[in-house]
Image (spheres, rainbow, N blue to C red):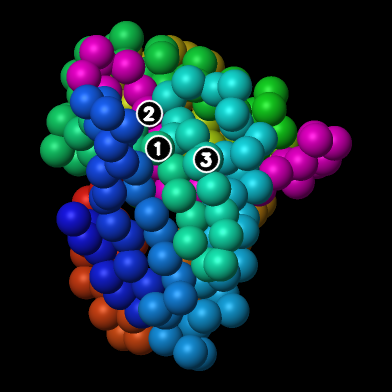
């Protein structure tokens, strides 16, 4: 079943059967990307594959099954995107923070967590994360990596402020009130460029290109 088709290729959910057992997988195929975007599409898929490979021991993220010939295959992660599930339980946000800390300990900063569609509320109420195309992998935990990790947490807290504002702690409010230099630069100019490209060039008319991303 095709979940998405755009200038960067296609995303499809596939079923693999082994006897009576059915395994759900997601395949991102960049071979169908427009020729002028194909190098970028390949680079983003390589980035996602590297991040998922580093997160093989972390629950709550898809598991990498393969990356070959422009096709990335990963496990299907069951759950509802945040903007549909609208989590009000503070336990969800505690679990999400724990998940982020596991990512960062594994040397991965997601780097795209402002989008609610990248957050899942799983059937058991726990947090899940998808779409690692912009993730940064760094085992040295450089200053830049630590800044990106803090921005990951800050984006989570912004979502908590939306859905569970009464449970923000004093420390969390301080983090929200002090964006990083990278974040300030993004909001000052980078986001305008991004919005122009995604809406005018790529045709995404939703919040930061999130509404057309319906896969888990």
Q: Earlier in the sequence, mark 3 or mark 1?
A: 3
| Horizontal and vertical percent position of residue 25 | 34, 42
- Residue 124 within the magenta-colored segment of the rendering: yes
Q: Earlier in the sequence, mark 2 or mark 3?
A: 3
Do the numbered discs 3 and 1 sit on residues whose CB atoms are within 8 Å? no
Q: Is residue 118 left or right of residue 42?
A: left
Q: CA distance from mark 1 to mark 2?
A: 13 Å
Q: Residue at x 22, y 26 (%)?
A: 20
Depth order, front residue of 54/136? 54
Res. 64 mark: 3
- Residue 214 within the magenta-colored segment of the rendering: no
Residue topped by disc 2: 128
Residue topped by disc 1: 75
Q: Residue at x 21, y 60 (%)?
A: 2
Find the magenta span and give its range: 116-145
**Circle 1: element type:** strand
Image quarter in which the N terminus is found = bottom left
């Amino acid at each position: 079943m095709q979940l998405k088709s755009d200038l960067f290729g296609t995303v499809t959910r596939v079923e693999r059967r082994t006897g009576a057992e059915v395994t759900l997988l997601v395949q991102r195929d960049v071979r169908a990307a427009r020729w002028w975007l194909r190098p970028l599409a390949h680079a983003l898929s390589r980035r996602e594959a590297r991040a998922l490979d580093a997160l093989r021991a972390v629950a709550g993220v898809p598991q990498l099954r393969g990356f070959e010939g422009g096709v990335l295959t990963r496990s299907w992660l069951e759950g509802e995107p945040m903007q549909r599930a609208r989590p009000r339980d503070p336990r969800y946000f505690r679990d999400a923070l724990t998940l982020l800390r596991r990512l960062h300990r594994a040397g991965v900063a997601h780097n795209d967590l402002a989008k609610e569609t990248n957050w899942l509320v799983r059937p058991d109420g726990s947090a899940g994360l998808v779409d690692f195309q912009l993730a940064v992998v760094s085992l040295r935990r450089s200053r830049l990596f630590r800044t990106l990790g803090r921005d990951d947490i800050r984006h989570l807290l912004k979502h908590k402020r939306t859905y569970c504002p009464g449970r923000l702690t004093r420390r969390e409010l301080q983090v929200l009130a002090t964006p990083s230099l990278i974040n300030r630069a993004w909001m000052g100019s980078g986001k305008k460029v991004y919005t122009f490209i995604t809406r005018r060039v790529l045709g995404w008319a939703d919040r930061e290109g999130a509404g057309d991303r319906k896969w888990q």
